[in-house]
């Protein structure tokens, strides 16, 4: 089916994308309620922030070793083994959680998700032509969007069984469907040529020398102004995503007083809008216009967040309009940003550079949970303001990056 509908997909990109819905559908359902689930089980806003930061600290460590493990084990084995650890096992812990310590344990396990993230990134990119990478990341965005359409199913479970039992059922679905995805993807992909080369090189080099070699990637990143600019944009984008994922649902339920079962319609509305944008607008964006698209997307994201702190913020129509604008902004910025980052990294150094990029992202975003938790207790609108600031700065940096790229044409 993937071959018929998306003929440009070849090899590993086809195998990776075919099973991606089995991750994104349960993820979209449960992430809407993850923070509320913790809150309902007695975890305070500040503790939620500390748990988020703890997970990010573990992710810093797993990001640092992810390049080595991806090269040492191979892309396929690294993504399989560590996905089973960081998502399937973590899902089991979340499903049976009773208090804050269960969430601490799940955060420690889930923090190793950066290893399969790096491995998956290499697996889907390395054997894909650079010209086709925007296409692949756009399809990944589509699958994510379609996954969001299933978020209201989580709302139905919460409505039928209550917040805690309904979320437990969602976590059970996470374990079943994600495990199916991990195994199915493993059986339908092959190790990349670069993966085989790096497995041999890493075995010959040894652990100590390999890790020293990976730390040299920091010098490569800091030595290139172009890489610093595009990576800084990527870091800021991830910073606001951390705040949004952790606090937006809580903000809507606690501050805007939206019913829990209605909150699940926010990602569903976003998904519908994204599909419309993908159908009507994205095909009309020329290749040379991707930077303008990113800038427009960031500007719309600023507007959508401003709407959540000014105007009739408790009016459902106003919140729906903010959601629509946010969805348009994300759809015309995120895939192009992912492709720009992918194309900025040399294939020979992809695992090394991407793992160090992940470390840099996490070192900067790790305080987001604590800062957001503290700020939320002071004023729930402050995390939204921080998201606005991240988008404004990203806009400025992408303008500088575009100018630099034009100078080198």
Image (cartoon, rainbow, N blue to C red):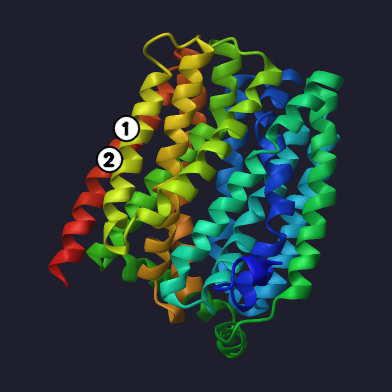
Q: Is residue 160 left or right of residue 109?
A: right
From this view, report whether residue 253 is shown above or below residue 326. Answer: above
Q: Nearer the viewer, residue 368 or 209?
A: 368
- Kindly state the secondary structure of the residue where label 2 is placed: helix
Q: Residue at x 42, y 31 (%)?
A: 325
Disc 1 to disc 2, C-alpha distance: 6 Å
User: Which mark is drawn over residue 393?
Assistant: 2
From this view, report whether residue 85 is shown above or below residue 389. Answer: below
Could you tell me residue 375's position as x and y percent?
45, 20
Q: Are marks 1 and 2 in contact (CB under 8 Å)?
A: yes
Q: Quadrant of residue 390?
A: top left
- Kindly state the secondary structure of the residue where label 1 is placed: helix
Q: Is residue 166 left or right of residue 211?
A: right
Could you tell me residue 72's position as x and y percent?
63, 79
Query: Label 1: few (<14), some or many (≥20) within 10 Å?
Result: some
From this view, report whether residue 40 is shown above or below residue 137. Answer: above
Q: Is residue 153 left or right of residue 266?
A: right
**Residue at numbered disc 1:** 389
Q: Residue at x 27, y 43 (%)?
A: 395
Q: Residue at x 17, y 72 (%)?
A: 409
Could you tell me residue 331's position as x and y percent?
45, 45
């Amino acid at each position: 089916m993937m071959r018929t509908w998306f003929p440009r997909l070849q090899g590993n990109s086809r195998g990776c994308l075919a099973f991606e819905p089995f991750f994104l559908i349960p993820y979209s359902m449960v992430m809407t309620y993850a923070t509320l689930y913790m809150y309902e089980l007695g975890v305070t806003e500040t503790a939620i922030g500390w748990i988020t930061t703890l997970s990010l600290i573990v992710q810093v460590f797993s990001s640092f070793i992810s390049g080595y493990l991806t090269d040492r084990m191979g892309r396929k084995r690294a993504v399989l083994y560590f996905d089973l650890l960081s998502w399937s096992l973590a899902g089991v812990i979340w499903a049976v959680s009773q208090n804050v310590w269960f969430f601490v344990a799940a955060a420690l396990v889930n923090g190793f998700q950066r290893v399969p993230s790096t491995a998956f990134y290499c697996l889907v990119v390395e054997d894909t032509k650079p010209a086709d990478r925007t296409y692949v990341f756009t399809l990944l965005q589509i699958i994510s969007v379609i996954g969001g359409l299933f978020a209201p199913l989580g709302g139905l479970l919460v409505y039928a069984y209550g917040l805690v039992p309904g979320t437990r059922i969602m976590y059970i679905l996470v374990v079943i469907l994600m495990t199916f995805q991990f195994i199915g993807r493993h059986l339908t992909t092959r190790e990349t040529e670069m993966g085989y080369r790096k497995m041999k090189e890493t075995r010959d080099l040894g652990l100590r020398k390999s890790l020293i070699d990976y730390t040299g990637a920091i010098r490569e990143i800091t030595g290139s102004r172009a890489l610093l600019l595009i990576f800084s944009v990527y870091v800021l984008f991830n910073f606001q995503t951390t705040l949004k994922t952790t606090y937006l649902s809580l903000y809507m339920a606690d501050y805007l007083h939206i019913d829990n079962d209605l909150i699940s319609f926010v990602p569903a509305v976003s998904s519908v809008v994204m599909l419309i944008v993908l159908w009507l607008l994205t095909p009309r964006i020329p290749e040379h216009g991707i930077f303008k698209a990113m800038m427009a997307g960031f500007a719309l994201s600023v507007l959508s967040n401003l709407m959540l702190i000014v105007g009739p913020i408790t009016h459902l129509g106003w919140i729906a309009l903010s959601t629509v604008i946010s969805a348009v902004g994300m759809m015309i910025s995120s895939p192009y940003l992912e492709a720009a980052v992918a194309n900025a990294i040399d294939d020979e150094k992809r695992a090394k550079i991407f793992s160090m990029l992940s470390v840099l992202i996490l070192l900067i975003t790790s305080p987001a949970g604590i800062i957001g938790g503290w700020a939320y207790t002071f004023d729930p609108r402050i995390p939204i303001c921080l998201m606005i600031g991240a988008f404004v700065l990203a806009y400025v940096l992408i303008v500088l990056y575009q100018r630099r790229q034009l100078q080198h044409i």
